[in-house]
Amino acid sequence: MTQRELQQSGLPYRMDDELWSYHYNALRIEKELNNTAGTERKRRMELVQELFASAGEGAYIQPPFYCDYGCNTTVGKNFDCNFDCVFLDCGKITIGDNVLIGPKVGLYAVGHPIDPTLKAEGYIVPYDITIGNNVWIGGSAVICPGVTIGDNTVIGAGSVVTKDIPANVVAVGNPCRVLRPITEEDTKFWTMQIEKQQP
């Protein structure tokens, strides 16, 4: 197997010319994205389409943004990523529809052998991250390798998510734990807040 095939299979790999070429392509697109003006929203959305393996309609990134490959990441429609996020997409990062990513969030789909000899030999271990639909990840949260976050869940700011988080919950902390379910009371409360603003 090639190093790229090892990476895509979730197996330990080492960098070679092919993988460096994918990385350099991501750096090229990132540089253009990070140099766009605030008024260039349409161009930013075009660059998101170019950077990622696939991106749904309306996917948007607020620069600066950094990732390893881009081509290992897929995002759904209405994806919205705030300032200064880092996606280490050595493993696959899969993000659903209507996901909000706060500023300074890190998605780290990668690890290294704990054994010092193998680590020194440059082995990289990909671990996939999956984020469902309608998820909100608060600012400065870290999503660790191999984590899955279920649909409709909210991750509190500053959380370090080391294990899977189910759907329909609010989860916070370091390590991140479920605080409570999202209920009909939440829907009623926020509906009332919005209705108050109606003329």
Image (cartoon, rainbow, N blue to C red):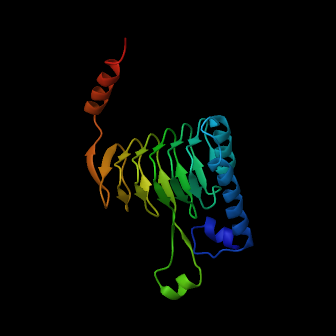
Quadrant location of the C terminus?
A: top left
Q: How many circles with numbers are drawn on the protein?
A: 0
Outermost residue to the bottom: 117
In this rendering, is residue 15 above or below 86? below
Outermost residue to the top: 199
Left or right, 60 with reference to 188 = right
**Residue 150 x/y as whole percent:** 41, 48
Quadrant location of the N terminus?
A: bottom right
Q: Nearer the viewer, residue 127 or 197?
A: 197
Q: Nearer the viewer, residue 11 or 43?
A: 43
**Residue 102 x/y as whole percent:** 44, 46
Snapshot quadrant of residue 12? bottom right
In this rendering, is residue 28 above or below 199? below
Left or right, 192 with reference to 133 = left
The residue drawn where x is 68% and y is 41% is 46
**Residue 100 x/y as whole percent:** 46, 42
The residue drawn where x is 70% and y is 56% is 28
**Residue 131 x/y as whole percent:** 47, 50
The residue drawn where x is 64% and y is 45% is 48
In this rendering, is residue 168 above or below 106? above
